[in-house]
Structures are given as C-alpha cells and as structure tokens.
Image (cartoon, rainbow, N blue to C red):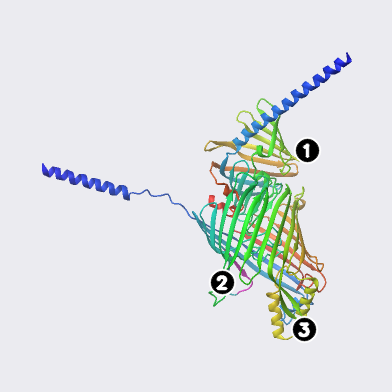
Amino acid sequence: MNKNRLFLILIFLFVSYVIWAQEGTTNMTEGNKILKIADENLMPVSFESYRKLINEEPDGSKKEFIFYTVKKGKDKVAMLYVSPASEKGRATLRLGDNMWLYIPNVGRPIRITSMQSVIGGVFNNADIMRLDYSFEYEATILDQTPSEYILDLKARTQIVAYDKLKMWVDKKNIMVTKVECYAASGTLIKTLEFKNVKNFGDEIMRPAVIETSSPLYKGYRSLMIYSSMKHRKLPDEVFTLEYLSRLGELR
Amino acid sequence: MRLIKNILLVALFTNAFTSGFSQEYDFDIPEEEEAKIEFNGNLDAKLGILQTRKSSPFFGLQFYDVSEKSDYLSQNRLDFYLNGEYRYKKVGFFMKTFTQYAKEESLSPSFFELYGSLNLSPRLSMSIGKRRFNWGKGYAFNPVGYVNAEKDPENPDLALAGKTSVYINYNKSLTSGSLQNFSVAAILLPLEAEINQKFASADEIGAAFKLYFLLKNIDLDFMAAFRKNEPQRFGMDFSANLRENVEIHSEIGYAHGENKYLIVDDLVLQQKIDGVSFLLGLRYLNRFNTTLIVEYYHNNKGLSKNEFTSYVDYLQSSLDSNIPAIINSAVFNMSTTFRSKTLMRDYLYMKIIQPEPFSWLYSSISMFTIYNLADNSLLFSPQLSYKPFTNFEVLLWPVFFFGDNHTEYGSKQFKRKVEIWMRFYF
C-alpha cells in the first residue's frame, strides 16, 4: 500500500513537473512572440529619426540635446548630435554589445560602455542607443490583466546594461507602455514610461515620448521626444567606425 | 486645292518640328538641392598663474634674456577655434582653424585642417589636403600613431594640427561570420614645403597603411609607415569590452632604424636603434558612475634615468657657460631634438573622472597623474569643470610637478601652475 502510494506521489510529481515545464516553455515562447511584435511596433526594421532629449534637474533647470538617429536590423544604431553647439558633430555607434563615441576634436572613435552616459542625466548609453528588446532579452509572461501583458525579461548575455526588465505591454495594439529596469541584485535602477502614441506617417505609429526616472537619481527626470521617424534603407557600411565622422551626410 | 494641301503640309511639318524641338529642350525646374554649409567653434579664454622653478636649467634657458626673474608669472591668452564645412552630394570641404591671441600684434591664424573630400559611396572615400589622423587606441599615448600629431598627455583631448596628405579608404561590412567589418586605408604624406617655402623633395613622400577589422567584438588594427631616410614602422592595436563597464586596449609597434638622441660629453649623439614600444590600457566604470583610465606606456626610444641626468647636466653646463652661442644651441636642442612630451622610457598614466559629485549639477571633477617609472617623478593634476549654461564651460585646472632636481617632472621650469579656462561654444 505504501509502495503504491509512493508510486502515485512520484507519478503526480512527474506529471506536475512536465506540465509546469511545458507551461514555462509555452510562457516563454508566447512571451518572446509578444516581445518581438512589441519591438516591431516600436521601431521599423530600418529607419531614420530626430529626437530631443531633455534632462530635468531637481532645481527645475533643463538641458536639451537633439539627435539624428539611424537604425538597421536588430543590432545596428548610429546617432549624431545635432545640438547644442558644444556637442555638435559628436557621433555614437552601437553594433550589438559594442559601442563607440566619436568626438571631432579627438578625431577617432573610442570604445564606450553601455552603462556610461555620454550626456548625463538618467538615460545611459544603452537607453539612448537601444536595440530591439528581443535581441538582448528572453521574455516570459509573468502576469496579465484584461488590458495588459506583464513580461519578465532576462538578459541573454552578461554585457547588457540591465540584468532584468519588467515590461508592461498593451494587449490591444501590442505596444510597450512601461519598463522597469533591475540590476542583478534585484534593485530597481530606473523606470521608463512610454507615452503619447503618435502617427508618424509611413505606417509608423508608436509612443512619441519616453519618460524616465530613477530612485538612484531622486528629483531627476529625463524625457526623450521623437519628432519624426521614417523608413529608410541604409547600407551596412553606414554602421561602421569609418563612417562615424561622415554621418552628417545622411541628413 | 494645291495651295491648301501645301499649307497643310507646311503646318504639319512645322508642328512636327516644333513639337520635337519642345520635347527635346523642355525641362522641369528641379527642386533646389541645398548645399550644406556650417560653421562652429569655440573661444577659450585662459588665465594662468605659474610658480617658477629658478633652479631648473629649463627655466634658466627659456628665460635667459629676462633680466629680472619673478617667482610667479601670469599668462593670459585667447584661443579661438573656427571650424567650417561644406557638403554637397559626394563632395565636401572641411577646415579647422586656430588663432591664439596673447597681446596686441598681428595675428597669424593657422589651419589645423584644410581638405576636400570625395565620398564615392559609403564604402569608398578619399580626401586631399591637410587632415588630422588619430591612429591607436590609447587615451594619453599612442605608440602606433604613425600619422598622428604628437599628443600631449597632459591634455589628450586638445585639437591638434593635421598633416598634408592624400587619403583613400575602402570600408566593407559583412553580415555573417566572426568578421563584421573591415577597412583598408592608404595615406600618402608629402613633406612640408621647405625648399624656397614652396617645394619639397619628391622622393621623400611617405606612405602609411592601416587595416582595420571588427572581429568577434574586438577592434583590431594593423598598420605600417614608410618614408625614405626614416625608420620603418609596423604596429598593431586592439580594444574590446570585457564586460558592460570594462574596456581594455593595447598598442604595440616595432620600429627599425629609429633615431634616438643622447647627450654624451655635452654633445648630442644620434643612435639608430630597433625595438618595440607598447601600451597597455584599461577603462573601468563603477556603479557610482566613476570612470577610471589606467595606461602603461613603454617608449623604446625614450631616455633612461642616467641618460636624462646627462641631458639635464648638459643644459645646466650650457647655461652656466654664459656664452650666447652655447646657450642658443642648448635652447635649440631643447625645443627640437628633445622636445617630445614623452622624453623618457616608462610612464604610468591614471585618470579618475567623477561627473556631478555630491549631486552638484553640471559639474565634473577629475584627477590625473603621469608617473615616470624610471625616475619616480610625477605630474599631478586635479580638474574641476562646471557647465552652468548651455554652450558655456568653466574649468579650473591646477598642475603640480613632483620629483628631484634631475628628474623629468622635478626639473620642469614651473613647480606648479593653475589655469582658469572659460570656454564659449558657438
């Protein structure tokens, strides 16, 4: 009798494990699918855009930067500083996990890290030159409400700015509405909120404003505002160190 | 009837002719494609106080003609940088000018860069004119910077003059495999005009080549430089991110027949040497946003401790001679043969940068030191930068030199100096 009971318990545990594992895999597959669509809705495969970045400080003062950005595929982003004059001509390039900064006076690109911030404020380099989330993270569905999916994103590699993300995705249009960024220790580093869904034309509809705040930078707030975004076919050579000083030719 | 037929024929012919004519010569007025012309730059107003080191032969020679030597000197100047560029389709024109104002006299602006470029495609580009190149991965030193202007490790970000060159570059990206991108660059370097201020020897045109690879997330360069009567140089460098906040870089260069200058018995001796110079570097960012840069540099043609002591003794004995010809010769050697910013053999550079310390907005503090490993002398400099307004920056920059009398930094003409820079961008 005891043997039979033990056998039944083992069978139960095995079946539970199989179901749980299956559920986990399904959640991950489903999560990755949602993440991929959310990525596609945020950024076309190949595009150019103009963005303004505003750093608001605790005393209410602001600093503004305007960037011209081009992106191709999942892992290629290049960005040119258009204003202010003190930063004009600087350019940054990201190819997967690699990032470089070109300063006209220095005359050559230097490697920078994703955790650095070339402009100060709450946004770091990884935020400003963001790749597709699905390129850097593996997603599972953590929870869902009638209107939103809540995804749990885990970094695919160690060379990613945040080890873990928690992402809210609107079910109706599969659009990211909020992202919380966590360190490996579980500490919340920053929160990004995606607002003001806007039609940019060219069948591109996405949030025009990304607002970020951080418990590590109390009183600081940074805003990223997209003024234009349009499809543009670009050769791979645009995303090279050699081309960084020539990025202005694309404008 | 015939008349009507003739009129019709003439009308038909005329119409056919005029319609053909109008088709051939009609044109649409094209939309104006604007050429892009841009100017920008900055004005640096610099005020400095320098404490002199009267015991230094460098000071004695530099201020030999000055009858009354002060303990403190002030230095006030305006550095004006004006950059311009013109771009139209594949053609570009670029200039960077530098003008320094120290007192009321005719100014002589110099072109740091002045070149035209032709970008035939994203892959193929070329330029001709005076252009600055910056080879190597090091922040403070570049042993493989064969075409670079000599960098000042005290201020590695300073704009520097380029070289007259013909440059061509081919750049190709690859979508699969470990190799993601490569480029091939070739540079021809004519000599500066020195014959009647207009001509230079044609058989002494130099050439330099560089191959770049982005291979498995590693930047890798191989370079070489040749010129008649100059050493042959071969080098390589790399940089890579070990983690999201750690970058390492290195340069190694071999030179065959490099000139090394020594002082032997108060005479300048030239030696031909072969050997390797190299650099090892690291850049690290911690969770408090503090950046640390560390570099070790071995300069193969640099002077050893004893060789530098002989050099200082030579300057001192020249000064003590009080003979104008000997003094002029020493000043000449000091400002030409021995003018390098890295005169000696082994250096350690370390810089720590902390943006917005103590939540002080728009400020940045940094400290750097250049430590001469051969003679244990060093330069130490804390810096404070503050950007209270857009396009304006103020910089407080003290520099201290430490070391014994016969050491590199201990024998500088100044014991310490402090400068205030106010920088206006436009």
Q: Residue at x 73, y 61 (%)?
A: B278
Mark 2 to mark 1 CA distance (whole Å): 66 Å
Dot 1: what SS?
loop
* Residue A166 shown in magenta: no
Q: Say which of B274 and A189 sits in front.
A: B274
* Protein chain holding label 2: B
Q: Quadrant of residue B415?
A: bottom right
Q: How many numbered marks, from 0 up?
A: 3
Dot 2: what SS?
helix
| Residue B116 image offset from top left, x and y in percent | 52, 61
Q: Residue at x 24, y 45 (%)?
A: B16
Mark 3 to mark 2 CA distance (whole Å): 43 Å
To which residue does mark 1 refer? A186
Q: Quadrant of residue B201?
A: bottom right
* Protein chain holding label 3: B
| Residue B298 image offset from top left, x and y in percent | 75, 64
Which quadrant is the C terminus of chain B positioned in?
A: bottom right
Q: How many residues crowd mark 1 within 10 Å: few (<14), some (14–19), many (20+)?
A: few
Secondary structure mostly taken by the magenta-highlighted segment of the chain: strand
Q: How many residues crowd mark 2 within 10 Å: few (<14), some (14–19), many (20+)?
A: few
To which residue does mark 3 refer? B320
Q: Same chain for marks 2 and 1?
A: no
The three-letter amino acid code for the residue at tag 2 is Asp
Q: Tell me, yes or no, if residue B147 can be seen here.
A: no
Dot 3: what SS?
helix
To which residue does mark 2 refer? B203
Give the residues in magenta. Answer: B96-104
The three-letter amino acid code for the residue at tag 3 is Asp
Q: On the rendered structure, is A179 left or right of B307?
A: left
Q: Say which of A46 and A149 sits in front.
A: A46
Residue at the far left in the pictured view: B1
* Protein chain holding label 1: A
